[in-house]
Image: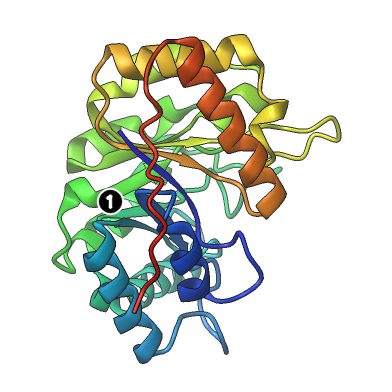
């Protein structure tokens, strides 16, 4: 498996972060959280530098598409705008050729929408139309990874399977919500290209250090990934340096407990 983390760890831009992460990680989740406006995407020079860094260090990139994209919205104007924003992000990312694209399909217009759509079939049709339009841009369908969010993934799973897409399995969300992460892993194994991992702190804030993730469950997760020969990305989906450093310690300890070498890289190199 390839060990990854996000491009929002250190104060600075995408390249600044990747240069510092390349020595320790195999994959960087490039976060294009904003859909437009100044600074939403790196400029061309930075994008080209990201491409060079990727080649020099045998990195893979997992692009996270804009959070505001509501790909199954009942508002047709908003749904189409969401598709456009994802396509714009893909166009901006083209120079560094992301290997995976992480997409949110909300059950409503955002996470924990208090008014989810009542017509499940219509919701699936809208999601399928948006995802098909994104796939029609020419990107390989298997590279499009629909993330597990805050609702039963079984609702969107038929669309993902029918379109030949992949899964970004957010283990942190499952444990946060009191669900069985290993059962989900077994069910979605064949389509999972990314496993997103993080803890939830005592204040119920997720995307925190793995020190807040139950250790026995951490061991069971890594054991399951190793036993199944998982070869996708395991990304520490945190957004602060302290959370990343503590999470990496936890990860190394778990591998040691299982008697397996930690797969993360160590040779310090810079990017030209």
Quick one: quadrant of the C terminus?
bottom left
Quick one: quadrant of the N terminus?
top left
Vertical arrangement, residue 179 with respect to residue 1, above or below: above
Vertical arrangement, residue 45 with respect to residue 174, above or below: below
> Is residue 133 or residue 138 the one in the foreground?
138
Give the residue pinned by disc 1. Answer: 144
Q: Residues within 10 Å of mark 1 (few under 14, many from 20)?
A: many
Say how the picture is coloured. Answer: rainbow
In the image, what residue occupies the spot 22% across and 25% down?
190
In the image, what residue occupies the spot 52% across and 82% down?
36
Measured as percent of width and height from the top left, residue 248 is found at: 56, 37
In the image, what residue occupies the spot 71% across and 48% down?
242
Measured as percent of width and height from the top left, residue 27 is found at: 36, 51
Residue 159 shown left or right of residue 178 in the figure: left
Measured as percent of width and height from the top left, residue 267 is found at: 37, 51
Vertical arrangement, residue 222 with respect to residue 6, above or below: above
Residue 202 shown left or right of residue 156 in the figure: right
In this view, the residue farthest toward the right is 203
Residue 80 visible in this rendered orientation of the protein: yes
Residue 239 shown left or right of residue 143 in the figure: right
């Amino acid at each position: 498996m390839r060990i990854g983390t996000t491009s929002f760890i250190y104060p600075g831009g995408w390249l600044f972060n990747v240069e510092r992460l390349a020595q320790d990680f195999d994959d960087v989740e490039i976060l294009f959280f904003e859909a437009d406006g100044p600074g939403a995407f790196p400029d061309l020079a930075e994008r080209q530098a990201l491409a060079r860094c990727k080649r020099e260090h045998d990195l893979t990139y997992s692009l996270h598409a804009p959070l505001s994209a509501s790909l199954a919205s009942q508002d047709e104007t908003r749904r189409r705008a969401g598709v456009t924003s994802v396509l714009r992000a893909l166009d901006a990312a083209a120079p560094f050729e992301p290997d995976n694209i992480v997409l949110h399909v909300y059950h409503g217009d955002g996470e924990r929408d208090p008014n989810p759509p009542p017509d499940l079939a219509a919701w699936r049709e809208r999601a399928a139309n948006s995802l098909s339009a994104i796939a029609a841009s020419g990107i390989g369908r298997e590279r499009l990874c629909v993330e597990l969010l805050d609702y039963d993934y079984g609702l969107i799973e038929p669309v993902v399977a029918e379109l030949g897409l992949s899964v970004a399995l957010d283990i942190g969300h499952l444990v946060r919500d009191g669900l069985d992460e290993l059962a989900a892993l077994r069910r979605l194994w064949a389509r999972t290209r990314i496993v997103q991992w993080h803890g939830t702190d005592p204040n119920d804030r997720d995307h925190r250090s793995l020190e807040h993730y139950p250790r026995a469950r951490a061991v069971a997760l890594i054991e399951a990934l190793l036993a199944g020969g998982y070869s996708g990305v395991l990304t520490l989906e945190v957004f602060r340096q302290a959370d990343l450093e503590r999470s990496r310690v936890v990860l190394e300890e778990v591998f040691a407990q299982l008697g397996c070498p930690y797969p993360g890289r160590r040779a310090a190199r810079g990017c030209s």
